[in-house]
Image: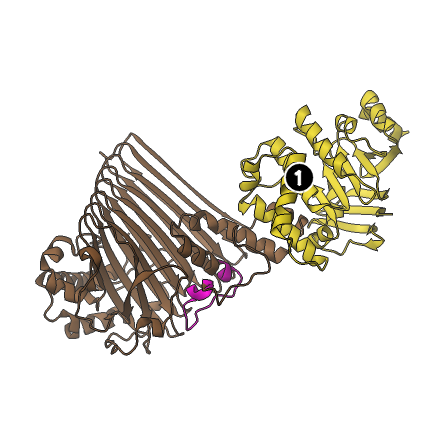
Amino acid sequence: MKTNQKNSRLLSSLLSYYPRLPENSNGHPVVSEIRQKAFERLKDIGLPGNKDDKWRDSGFMDIFNREFKMETEPAPYQKTINEIFECEIYDFHSEIISVLNGHYYAKDPEEIRTLENGVRVGSILTAQKEFPGLFDQYFGKIGDDQTDGLKAANSAFFKDGVFIYVPDGVEVKDALQLIKMVNEQGNPFIASRNLIILGKNSKLTFMHCDDSINHLSSFINTFTEIHVGENATLELYKLQNLNDESALLNNTFIRQGRNSRTSAIVLSLNGGKIRNELHIDLNGEGAETDLSGVYLMDKEQHIDNQVYVNHLVPHCNSKTLYKGVLDNKATGIFRGYIYVKQDAQKTNAFQKNNNILMTSDARIDTMPFLEIYADDVKCSHGATVGQLDDEALFYLMQRGISRENATLLLMNAFTSEVTSKISIEPLKNSIEDMIKKRLRGELSICDKCILHCTVPDKPVEFEIDLSKI
Amino acid sequence: MLLNIKNLHVSINGKEIIKGLNLGVNYGEVHAIMGPNGTGKSTLAAAITGREGYEITKGVIEYKGKDITKLTPDQRANEGIFLSFQYPVEIPGVSMINFMRTAIDTRREYNGLGPIPPGEFLKRMEEMKKLVEINTKLTKRSVNEGFSGGEKKKNEIFQMAMLEPTLAILDETDSGLDIDALKVVARGVNALRSDKNAFIVITHYQRLLDYIIPDFVHVMWDGRIVKSGGKGLALELEERGYEWVKELVEN
């Protein structure tokens, strides 16, 4: 049943703002057409309602009636992103791309950078003019959800975002790291859009970081399309460390070609409301996807992970593993969808979601949805919701470890099933440090990136040595 | 006296399990506690180690001359009390080697010492692994994860050897062990026996006591120690069965 909201402040602000949308002028005709169609659809269907199956119990409903600021100016480039926000991971080199308030942030925002081996990186608004062919071929081709007003709102209203093109056969050495930040008063609605294209036999590590540098509120609506070509490899990391006033909607659509591989790790460390939709289309035989996530929520935070794995052709493998710890009055949703098309024989699809609730007020709704139309498949799913294991806690304490440290150790062990998958050692160490800090209650948003924590002159000290656990 | 339990009463969820138990253990002694299922043997171990949910309604547990009933499980452990678990817990994600180092360092800190030097730690690991014939592969894994029943029990004795407790309680360490593993466990215990520590060995069967020779044997029945004696008592029990104890109690 669909009962979308047609009366909300957010919707009326969006509808009245559209004619004045500056990004709409002189864009590529393909993009302008997509914007216009998306706008018509938004007008038609409105925003999601809490009776919509895919938005049931969502913590987002109550923000739709807030007052939003639609217009944001691109900030003049005065400082490098590193001066605004330090995000150093010791012994790890990445190519930084930044988006501030939804606008591409660079010394020359119009420049599409050319990295080694012809890799192109730049603003999506510029790229649509410079690479009309690629836009015709790829832009708006996946994630065209006719039923979701917030996705339509992104297509119609995105300010800017990132374009990445990796040519055939190119293995990108350093990770590309997108750092998105908001620094705008007045509760802005910020839509940004990314398009990433991996050619045949190419390889890319992409980090998508959403960070806060202050306590201002905002609603961030992000939409990322990733095309993974034949025999290409994508490693995707999402790091979310936002303030408690932020609402983040993070939609990611990935289409995989024949024999391609994707591994995605989604880490939600902090944020008022976060909804991650991760949609994978396994569109070529032999494609593999490995999706995992860790979420650590407390206070009255809300986390919603929606993972869609679509097996569209035979001989593809997928694994999904999400683990969460919810404390205080935090609420969460996990929905894992596995769809196996009729002729997608020899599919292997596995899904697991494990949760620890630290209090009786914390809440998680976890639901698997399996739709299988082929008859020669291996599929499984499992979900658990529990407390910290009392037996294990006592066992550790009987060996002399304090309750506090035993609890920390068990929670850390719980999340390590996911973090151990991180293949880049310095990144893994930084992320594990962040998780430890978060679990100790020491991690809040700071002016500087918390990834700073493993820089040798700023060591993180723990009462017990967890470094190799 | 190392351990002096006087008139101990323990309840779980309001139900009294231990109903006035007395037990004294001196340095250098091995005490066996025998008795059928459900007579309170494991409850006694839980009460001494401070497990949550085991309410001491009456009596005291004196250890090294002090009442420890108000101490937390980790404080008691750091005071030198060790429990070899009947069912050792699997802890995925926590590696055996770091668990051990954390436990030892915590104990050392409690006693005002710095962390164990890495060389010393590794040397001790090697020695103790040999003692209980535990495979290096196991110590590299997560705590007890995927260990067989026998390996888990050997791992308990390994941990005991590493931590050098003053009072070690072995809760049915023999259950589920084949004779070879049993001998290994017994050898470990015997190697650690000294006049600076003491052992309480909880068991159903006399079998283990062929290898770990006790100084005293106590028989538990309905939350109390109803008969105590020397090592001969275990043999007598084996011969005459627990029915004999029942008759003793009833008469």
Q: Residue tagged by mark 1?
A: B128
Where does the image place residue B80, in percent across and percent down from the top left?
74, 49
Where does the image place residue A274, in percent across and percent down from the top left?
37, 61
Q: Residue at x 64, y 50 (%)?
A: B103
Looking at the image, which is closer to me, A377 or A423?
A423
Q: Residue at x 36, y 63 (%)?
A: A60
Task: Return the chain for callout 1.
Answer: B
Name which residue type carries label 1: Met
Viewport quadrant of the C terminus of chain B = top right
Q: Is residue B60 magenta?
A: no
What hue does chain B carry in this figure? yellow
Where does the image place residue A12, in percent across and percent down from the top left?
24, 71
Q: What residue span does the magenta drawing correspond to?
A: A436-454
Q: Residue B26 occupies which quadrant of the picture?
A: top right
Q: Is residue A120 above or below residue B208?
A: below
Q: Residues within 10 Å of mark 1 (few under 14, many from 20)?
A: some
